[in-house]
Image: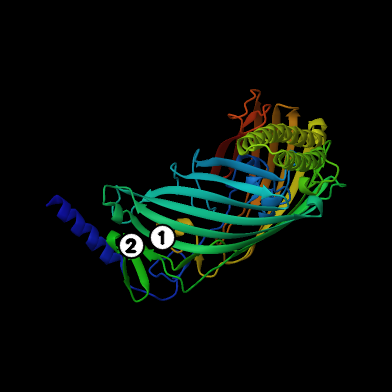
């Protein structure tokens, strides 16, 4: 009886909220009572790995490793000084916890009441580099817990997931790098209380994005420039995934579930990012030579000798067998001779393979010599700007969660960023600091200035991870902070030390 009464009350409350208005979005501050709007997934605070946060998001011109995928798709094909082979790979990840000290305003809409200690951001990905070409993937996950619109004592889980797939190519020995990508982005809302699995997801809204980027990294200059474009497809005729099992209903073009009017679409608004970085005391750019096209390498010489030796052994074996047949040897004797010659060939081939491995390692050591001898001290300065285009009929994520019209993205916004990085204790500690201006996407809300800081600490313990890495590989732990009025975030990460 109690469960039936509770279900009836919930159903009555949901129905009571439904006005079935398929018309335009209402005035500022009014309840949302239509599905004719778009969630504006604007990135205000920098949510990324520790290095990017520490550099205040000024990462578009640096674009190194997996951390750069979301900032410049060309990062997937950008070769680093320690990348000395035709094939290379990279893995990276991290998390950020936007935490509230006194109050919390994640999207800078001027409302300090949205304090949510359960907010969480994680990022991770990997890439493969094969000669001049590369491919990679990255996924960002944000999670929030918010109060249910139909039951004040219950919460919902909101998951924001962004998946990015990339292809890249390096030209002119790595001085010009290009990248393309495709993104899939969705917002899902789920129950947290005890309901059947089929009823947990209230609804999900999905949108797409296209990405392109370029890096100019001249080996003869201590600077690097980068630019990237993200085009966010805003499809006004798309429909949310409305889960009928969870109570989602539709009439006259409006979609309502658990008291939420669902948007027809979401959009990562179109962005243009560009910037320049320069580095003192240590080279910033390195010319990458494709080992497969390298002339006069130890491996090429060893392979030529091995091929000549194998041809000579094959010819000698043919002569020996032919001579045995002409001499009237029995078939058993000839078979025994063939087995002996084959065994000798296998032994010689194993020795040649070992020579090839040694020659390949000699080539790799020679190509890494410049990296290993480079000075550790450095001072890297990076400046970038992010320009975000308007979003038609957009509201913020918080506006959707509160079901109150707060228009977001009515105007183009510009966000300048500046970051500095230095190796404070050569070989052991890297420090970072920076700042950026976060304009508001909302009406009559002032921009705010963020200050960031971060560091890497080397763990001086060598481990090859069961032979997967070099014997002298060491690791790092990383951390970063981002603070401004009504916002404080921190993050940590673990990776290789270079």
Residue drawn 29% across the image and 59% down it: 246
Badge 1 local density, few (<14 within 10 Å), some, or many (20+)? many
Task: Mark 2 and mark 1 in contact? Answer it, CB < 8 Å.
Answer: yes
Percent coordinates x, y for residue 91 in the rendering? 60, 42
User: x%, y% of residue 414?
Assistant: 67, 59
Residue under the point 62% across and 28% down: 464
Question: What secondary structure is found at the residue carrying circle 1?
Answer: strand
> Looking at the rendering, which quadrant does residue 23 occupy?
bottom left
Asked which quadrant contains residue 252, the reply is: bottom left
Q: Quadrant of the C terminus?
A: top right
Residue 262 in view (yes/no):
yes
Q: Is residue 226 left or right of residue 5?
A: right
| Residue assigned mark 2 | 243
Task: Spot the residue most to the left.
Answer: 1
- Where residue 469 appears, as percent x and y from the top left, is 64, 33
Give the SS element for disc 2. Answer: loop
Viewer-closest of 314 and 457: 314
Q: Is residue 105 above or below residue 247?
A: above
Q: Nearer the viewer, residue 428 or 27?
A: 428
Per the model, the C-alpha gap separating discs 2 and 1 is: 8 Å
Inspect this view and state whether residue 406 appears.
no
Q: Is residue 273 left or right of residue 158?
A: right
Residue located beneath label 1 in the image: 204
Q: Residue furthest top?
A: 461
Q: Residues within 10 Å of mark 2 (few under 14, many from 20)?
A: some
């Amino acid at each position: 009886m109690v469960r039936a009464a509770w279900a009836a009350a919930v159903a009555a409350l949901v129905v009571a909220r439904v006005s079935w208005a398929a018309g335009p979005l209402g005035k500022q501050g009014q309840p949302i009572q239509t599905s004719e709007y778009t969630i504006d997934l604007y990135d205000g605070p920098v949510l990324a790995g520790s290095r990017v946060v520490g550099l205040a998001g000024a990462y578009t011109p640096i674009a190194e490793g997996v951390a750069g995928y979301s900032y410049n798709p060309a990062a997937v094909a950008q070769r680093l000084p320690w990348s000395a082979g035709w094939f290379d790979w990279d893995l990276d990840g991290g998390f950020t916890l936007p935490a509230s000290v006194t109050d919390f305003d994640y999207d800078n809409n001027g409302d300090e009441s949205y304090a949510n200690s359960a907010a969480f951001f994680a990022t991770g990905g990997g890439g493969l580099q094969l000669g001049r070409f590369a491919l990679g993937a990255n996924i960002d996950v944000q999670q929030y817990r918010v109060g249910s619109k139909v039951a004040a004592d219950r919460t919902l889980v909101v998951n924001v997931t962004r998946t990015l797939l990339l292809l890249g190519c390096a030209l002119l020995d790595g001085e010009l790098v290009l990248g393309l990508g495709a993104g899939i982005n969705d917002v899902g809302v789920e129950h947290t209380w005890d309901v059947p699995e089929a009823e947990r997801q209230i609804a999900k809204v999905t949108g797409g994005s296209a990405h392109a980027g370029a890096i100019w990294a001249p080996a003869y200059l201590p600077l690097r420039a980068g630019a990237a474009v993200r085009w966010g497809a805003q499809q006004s005729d798309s429909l949310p995934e409305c889960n009928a099992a969870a109570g989602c209903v539709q009439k006259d073009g409006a979609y309502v579930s658990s008291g939420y009017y669902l948007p027809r679409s979401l959009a990562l608004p179109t962005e243009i990012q560009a910037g320049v970085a320069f580095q003192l005391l240590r080279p910033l750019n390195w010319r990458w030579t494709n080992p497969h096209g390298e002339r006069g390498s130890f491996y090429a010489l060893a392979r030529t000798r091995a091929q000549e030796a194998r041809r000579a052994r094959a010819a000698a074996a043919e002569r020996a067998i032919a001579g045995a047949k002409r001499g009237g040897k029995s078939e058993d004797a000839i078979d025994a001779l063939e087995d002996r010659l084959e065994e000798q060939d296998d032994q010689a081939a194993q020795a040649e393979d070992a020579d090839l491995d040694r020659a390949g390692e000699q080539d790799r050591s020679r190509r890494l010599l410049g990296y290993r001898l480079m000075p550790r001290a450095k001072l890297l300065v990076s400046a970038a700007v992010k320009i975000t285009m308007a979003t038609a009929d957009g509201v913020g994520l918080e506006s959707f969660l509160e079901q109150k019209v707060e228009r977001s993205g009515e105007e183009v916004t510009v966000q300048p960023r500046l970051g500095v990085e230095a190796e404070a204790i050569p070989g052991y500690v890297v420090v970072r600091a920076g700042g950026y201006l976060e304009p508001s996407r909302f009406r009559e809300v002032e921009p705010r200035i963020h200050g960031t800081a971060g560091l890497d600490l080397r763990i001086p313990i060598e481990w090859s991870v069961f032979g997967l890495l070099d014997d002298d590989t060491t690791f790092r732990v990383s951390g970063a902070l981002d603070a401004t009025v009504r916002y404080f975030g921190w993050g940590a990460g673990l990776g290789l030390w270079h």
